[in-house]
Amino acid sequence: MKIQSADFLVSNSRADQCPQSDFPEYAFIGRSNVGKSSLINMLTGRKALAMTSSTPGKTMLINHFVINNEWYLVDLPGYGYAKRGRYEVEKLKKLINYYVLQRQQLTCLFVLIDSRLEPQKIDLEFIRFLGENGVPFGIIFTKADKPKRGELKKNVERFLQTLHEEWEELPPYFITSSDTGQGRDEFLDYIEQINQSLK
């Protein structure tokens, strides 16, 4: 797939106010500071389409980007950022849960995993939540250029093996780097395949 156009459309604090459109939606979610904004910029080829920040948990809204005027890329708030107050944490949890469980246009939710780390309990719990609720999802390992090659492979395999303890069949997964562009073509080709199958 070639990205011919990528534009920010709208931000919403409520999932029921998201665009009413027949476009398929592919949403990104992950722990705070996992690299969502950088990945969106890399995939779309636009350096500042999604605003990146060194402050974890910056995204508080559901951000819609329209791609090639035929599908939406959606940036969801990160989960698991502990420095928020209890009210804010609950508000974000409700926002995410409502979007993930009620948004009919959601075609696939991609959970972003930091490839530098061992399997994190919060990621595994969120993936279990998706499975229990029948939400279609994939996994994107981010920051693949940061660990050493052997360490990257070991971390990815360890995460997949941990999933295998509960899942008979693993979801599709991609290994990406926002700095080098690794994984871009594979991911966009996957989206194109789904879009074609929906037509």
Image (cartoon, rainbow, N blue to C red):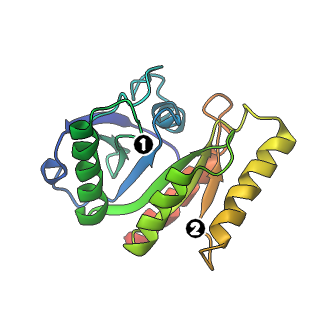
Q: Is residue 117 left or right of residue 111?
A: right
Q: Which residue is mark 1?
A: 80
Residue 71, placed above or below residue 105: above
Pick the residue in front: 65 or 192. Answer: 65
Residue at screen point 54% across, 58% down: 124
Position of 172 relative to 58 (above/below): below
Q: Residue 193: horizontal and vertical position, in percent?
A: 52, 64
Judge by depth and name the residue closer to the eye, 48 or 60: 60
Q: Which residue corresponds to the image point at 64% horizontal and 28% vertical from the top-left?
A: 179
Q: Residue at x 72, y 65 (%)?
A: 161
Compared across the picture, whether 122 is left or right of 71 comes to right
Residue at mark 2? 171
Q: Taking 181 as reference, is 152 above or below it?
A: below
Where does the image place residue 156, in percent across and percent down from the top left? 72, 52
State the separation of the CA atoms marked 1 and 2. Answer: 22 Å
Q: For residue 11, what is the image quadrant?
A: top left
What x and y, as percent, mark residue 22? 23, 61
Secondary structure beneath disc 2? loop
Q: Earlier in the sequence, mark 1 or mark 2?
A: 1
